[in-house]
Image: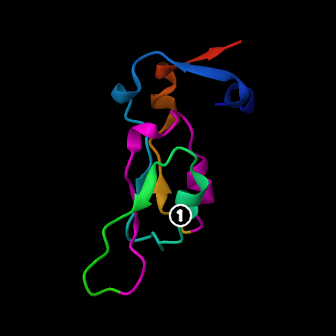
Amino acid sequence: MNDKNQRRKRRLTVPRAEIAWYPVIDAELCNSCLSCYNYCPKDVFASAKAEEGLRRRPKMEVANPYRCIVLCSACEQECAAGAISFPSPEEFEQFVEYLD
């Protein structure tokens, strides 16, 4: 997808609940820094349940996956630990139409 398409207004061609576009967090890489939580305006992320006996902050989890904006992956770049990934955007272009 080029920068021009990213700036154009988009509309989904099917209901959002039918589109499996959302982030996945690698718990092994997540350092609980909260950067994804603080960055995302759609409240996709939340703290996972704290592990019994551990003093550190709980890892992050994708609590509201279908609030994620289709084809947005900005949080992936915000994650310094590299714990966030997305599916290939090309697989999801079919669900978005660009408006002029």
From the viewer's perspective, is 61 left or right of 77?
left
For this orientation, the residue located farthest to the top is 100
Q: Mark 1, residues whose alpha carbon is within 10 Å: few (<14), some, or many (≥20)?
A: some
Residue at 54% in and 69% down: 81
**Residue 77 appears at what percent x and percent y?**
62, 55
> Does 11 appear above or below 59?
above
Instruction: State which quarter of the image contains the N terminus.
Output: top right
Is-magenta flag for residue 66? yes
Viewer-proximal residue among 74 and 42: 42
From the viewer's perspective, is 67 left or right of 52?
right
From the viewer's perspective, is 22 left or right of 11?
left
Instruction: State which quarter of the image contains the C terminus.
Output: top right
Residue at 53% in and 71% down: 33
> How many numbered marks have been drawn onto this rendered protein structure?
1
Q: Provide the residue designation for mark 1.
A: 82
Viewer-proximal residue among 47 and 26: 47
Q: Secondary structure at mark 1?
A: loop
**Quarter-of-image position of residue 2:** top right
**Residue 67 appears at what percent x and percent y?**
45, 39
Task: Tell me the magenta residue range.
Answer: 55-80
Residue type pointed to by label 1: Gly
**Residue 91 appears at what percent x and percent y?**
45, 30
Is-magenta flag for residue 12? no
> Does 15 appear above or below 100?
below
Residue at 54% in and 58% down: 36
Residue at 58% in and 46% down: 41
